[in-house]
Amino acid sequence: MSTKKELVRRWVVWLSPVLRIVVAAAIIANLTGCGKDVPLPPINGGEVSVRGADQQWHREPLTEQQVRSISVWFEDHRTGWSGLWETPPLFQFEFSIKTTDGQTHSIGVNVRPTGDGTTYVFGARPDFPLRKGLSKDDIEVLRKAASKDTP
């Protein structure tokens, strides 16, 4: 008959892989986090960087109209974000925004040849970084917000 010590050892040996699976599943669930919200405080400034035809980055401060456009876009797209667990591609343009709580967040936008794309948000909150697929219309709104001549 097995001793208590032997039973405990067998139980620990059996439990170890199960615990690893449970911990891995919890980590993956947190990273992929389908349907996360992006509760950004109000945006009060920042910069936009656009990769030009010369493949160089051109950085400009955001105008008040650009800040309003990005703020409205984020209000309309607060939900449906998921955790980022891959290396994002090189962005076509990127916003570095400052929020009223003093934090800085980076929003990178990648556009596919089909016109749709993905945006990535990096920031100081525990849920960041996050990603969200975008339609052609969403991309166009952000592209206009990145432009100095935003109406």
Image (tube, rainbow, N blue to C red):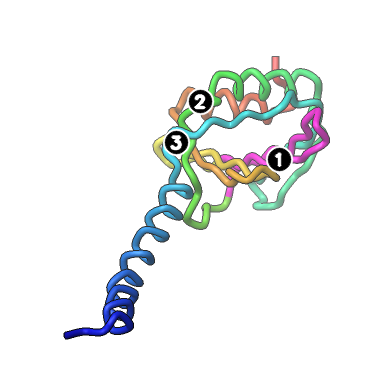
The magenta stretch is 91-109
The quadrant of the image that shows the C terminus is: top right
Q: Element at badge 3?
A: strand
Q: Callout 1, which amino acid?
A: His
Is residue 132 or residue 53 the one in the foreground?
Answer: 132
- What residue sits right under mark 2 in the picture? 138
First in sequence: mark 2 vs mark 3: 3
Q: Residues within 10 Å of mark 3 (few under 14, many from 20)?
A: some
Mark 2 or 1: in front is 1
- Residue 38, image x, y percentages: 58, 31
- Residue 55, image x, y percentages: 65, 52
Residue furthest toward the left?
A: 1
**In this picture, is 65 found above or below 88?**
above
Quadrant of the rendered image containing residue 39: top right
Q: At x 31% / y 65%, what residue is drawn?
A: 18
Label placed on residue 133:
3
- Residue 135, image x, y percentages: 43, 28
- What residue sits right under mark 1 in the picture? 105
Residue furthest toward the top?
A: 151
Mark 2 or 3: in front is 3
First in sequence: mark 2 vs mark 1: 1
Main SS class of the magenta portion in the image: strand
